[in-house]
Amino acid sequence: MRKIIRNDVNEDWAHSGIIEAGDFAFIGYCVGNVGQSIENQINGAFDHLIERLESIGLKLESVVKIDCMFRDIWNIPVLEAIIKERFEGKYPVRKSIQTEFAHRGGSGGLQFQLDAVAFKG
């Protein structure tokens, strides 16, 4: 049996940002540009995802699934435009949900977060 590798561990949050298990990597809590526009926050989350993928030798094209969390689900069209730019037709499976974040709220707070699964094979 191969080993499970936990990276980007935050003891205060009891959280691993990246877990490598078998042929897959699970990347959680990707956020960026909190307090800025929804477009900037979505791009910031993808930048954070790319940074984490690169830390384990992967690229964005290895992503097979993303879970997208919005404070306002009606911002999905902004996400779709950014996905079209970044994935160049090689789209992952996607789920989008609306939620209240346990983070500074309102227009100056967190509006978007994503989690991802990437194929390492």
Image (tube, rainbow, N blue to C red):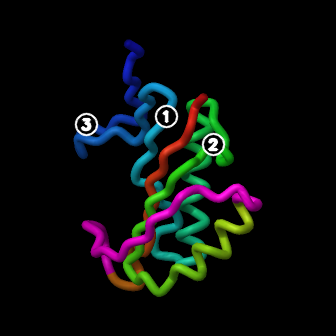
For the record, the magenta segment spans: 87-105
Q: Are marks 2 and 1 in contact (CB under 8 Å)?
A: no
Nearer the N terminus, badge 2 or badge 3?
3
Q: CA distance from mark 2 to mark 3?
A: 28 Å
Q: x, y (%) of residue 79?
A: 58, 73
Q: Are marks 2 and 3 in contact (CB under 8 Å)?
A: no
Q: Quadrant of the C terminus?
A: top right
- Vertical comparison of 48 with 83: above or below: above
Image point (31%, 78%), residue name: 105
Circle number at residue 11:
3
Image-based side of 65 in relation to 16, left or right: right
> For the residue labelled by badge 3, is the local secondary structure a helix, a strand or a loop?
loop
Mark 2, mark 3: which one is toward the viewer?
Answer: 2
Q: Name the residue tied to disc 1.
A: 24
Image quadrant in which you'd find residue 96:
bottom left
> For the residue labelled by badge 1, is the local secondary structure a helix, a strand or a loop?
strand
> For the residue labelled by badge 2, is the local secondary structure a helix, a strand or a loop?
helix
Q: Amino acid at mark 1?
A: Phe
Q: Name the residue tied to disc 2.
A: 62
For the residue carrying disc 1, how many other residues have a C-alpha within 10 Å: few (<14), some (14-19), or many (20+)?
some
Image point (74%, 61%), residue name: 89
For the residue carrying disc 2, how many other residues have a C-alpha within 10 Å: few (<14), some (14-19), or many (20+)?
some
